[in-house]
Structures are given as C-alpha cells and as structure tokens.
Image (cartoon, rainbow, N blue to C red):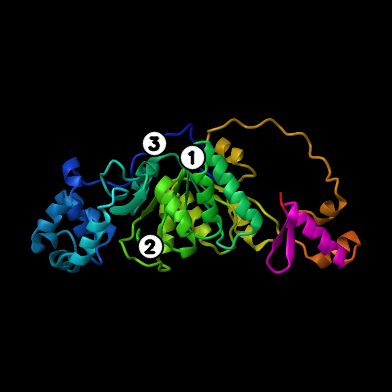
Amino acid sequence: MTRARLSGILPFPESRVTLPAVSPNESNDTLSWLQLTLLPGLTPATQRKLLRAFGTPAQVLATPRGLLGQHVGAQDADRIAKGANEALVERALRWLEDPNHHLLTLGDPAYPRGWLELSDPPSAVYAIGRVELLNAPSLAIVGSRNSTPQGTRDAYAFAQALSAAGLCIVSGLALGIDAQAHRGGLEGTGASVAVMGTGADRVYPRRNVEVAQQLAQRGCLVTEFALGVPPEAANFPRRNRLISGLARGVLVVEAAEKSGSLITARFAAEQGRDVFALPGSIHSPLAKGCHILIKEGAKLVESAHDVLVELGLAQPAPAAAPATEDADPFLRAMGFSPVTVDQLAQLTGGEASGVSARLTRLQIEGRVSALAGGWFQRVG
C-alpha cells in the first residue's frame, strides 16, 4: 500500500483531469462560476464536460438549450436553462465579501493541484484562511472519533513534529484524532488544513468550533459543499477522498475495524499516496484498523521521524541501543496492553485496593491513563 518514495518535496504529477481553457479574467467571473456550480443536480463531471465544450461558465450559461442537449442529457439542459437558485447565489456572494473567504475554481492558480489528479475533482471549492496551504507539502492524519488518551497524545505529538518539519497537517475536523491533529499542526510552521463535510458556514461537530476558529485564523478550512449544506452521512466519504488527495500521504493513528479512516487510507492508496499506520495492542479495538492496513502493506511507523524518512525528507536514524528492562515491577507486570484492576491484582499478587491506589498515583504522574470501562494502560 506504500507507494515508491519521492525524492524531496516535488509538485504533484500531471493532472488526470483535462482542464477547460479558462483565461485569468474569465476564471475570476465569480458570479458565473456560482451560477453554474450551484445548479441543482448538475454533477462536477457534467460541469467539466460543459466547460471543455464551451470554455467558460458564462459561455455555458449563455448557450441555447438545444445546443446544450447535444452535449448533456435533456434533464441537465433543462436544469441549466432554469438557472440556479438566486437566493443561494446571493448568499454565496455576501459570504465572499469577507476578505478571508475564497471561492477557488478549476484553472485558478490557488486551486489544489493534488485534486487535479482525482477522477472527480470539485469544480469549485469554498475556503477560509490561508489558501496557499492547499498547495503546500502536506500529510494527512486521521483516526477514531472516540480515541484513547494515548491515541490523542500520539496524534498531537506526530502532528506537531511533522508540522515543525514543514509539512502541513490535513485532517477532517472530526472529534478525537482529527481535532488533535489540527491542534498539533497549528503549533508548527507547517500549520493545518481541515477538509469539511459541510458548507463552509457550518462547523460540525459543534464541539470543534474553537479549533475551526483557529484554523480560520492561522490555517485553512476548505469544502466542496455549498453554503448551508448540513452534515449528511453521504458527505463524509466524499470529503475523505479530498483529504487524501490533498496530501503526500495518510497516517492513521487509531481506527476500528470498520472506520472512515480506513476509507481515507484506501483512497490514498488508490491515488498513489503513501499510507502509514501506528501499531497498537492486539487487545485494543482501535488498533484493529491500523493492523489491517499494515497487513495490506501500509508502512508501520513508531515516530514522526519514520514518516519523514519514508517521504525522503530525513535520513534514517542510527541503530538505538538495546532497551533496558523496566525497573518498576508494577509497570513491568502491567505491560502496555489495557488491563483491569482485578487483572493487575492477579499479575502482581496484590490486593485490589492497593492496586487502585498505585494506579491513581501513576495517573497523577502521567505514566498511566484510565480508559473507558474500567481499563488502564501505560503511557508510552
């Protein structure tokens, strides 16, 4: 699943999509682009077909219905003749009055080059913030919404380290791993981009409003969905192909056996991107998805440096000295897999009350985390 290593940070390869011949002045015709892309039921593929045939959105919209019908079906020709909802167009124009809001269209220099490799790129996207990040060297970090404390820390630490190395961190603004990846990415020079599954004027989930505000100020938010589009289930697989398409690779931190993160990883493999996965305990449900990816050929990584080496951005580290045995017999008995108080009492030969007290002290010291359901796990 891991593709051949690239030498350095290079532009994305030649687009798989034939772009319409749009001049710079015509590409800035925001009104025409909105009127075309906000036509209900007109897919991006149909929009691109029409642009190749007629050149610009304005020319498409001015073409007689009969001539349109020679290139698309009668139903699509009727949609174009009827026109877009004027209220939706006006809403978008008002939204674009904010200098931090942007509409990026095919042929626009700021349009993400990585998406031009996709078989079905959006014709226009809405963005908030630093649109130059959409063409910066990037890595996607995704994972479970219900992440463990260890997974949360790993996502933040990997994102922070990779951002400090100059990679923009891309994720999907979900709870758990995604949110921590954005926070870590914003701590480094590479910053972070969120690909949304809603309209740009809606933040989902609402608990991530704060991180979305930070992204709008110091990173970037981008979506192919029109303003006002709610968080419908079908939106997120579409969003996932854009997450992987924006980045040079995808790192999965934690994922269940059936997870949207695996969808993103498989999009990445199909798109020729690198796929990385963090291993976990064989007893953890949130390690199952990562282990599946590793079996399928994803690169097992244990540090941000491993990712940078695989991308050709760092040299392999010298071999480390053999690890010494853990001096604390309690932690040695605990191991690194989740355990309960009763299991620890059996492993250590102690009383449950004493084990509970010891776990409390270790949590305060930051060496053990409490998981849901009465389980505990060492912090690596």
Instruction: Identify which residue, 144 or 59, lies in the foreground.
Output: 144
Instruction: Name the residue carrying label 3.
Output: 11
Q: Mark 2 points at which residue?
A: 202
Question: Between disc 3 and disc 1, whose residue precedes?
Answer: 3
Question: What label sits on residue 86 in the rendered view?
Answer: none
Residue lying at 31% horizontally and 62% vertically, measured from the top left: 227
Segment colored magenta: 352-378
Asked if marks 3 and 1 touch (Cβ < 8 Å), the reply is no
Q: Is residue 299 visible?
A: no
Q: Which is nearer the N-term, disc 2 or disc 3? A: 3
Q: Distance between the residues labelled 3 and 1?
A: 14 Å
* Residue 69 horizontal/vertical position (percent): 14, 63
Disc nearest the viewer among 3 and 1: 1
The crowding category of the residue bearing disc 2, from other C-alpha atoms within 10 Å (few below 14, some 14 to 19, many at least 20), is: some
The amino acid type of the residue labelled 2 equals Arg
Q: Residue at x 51, y 40 (%)?
A: 188
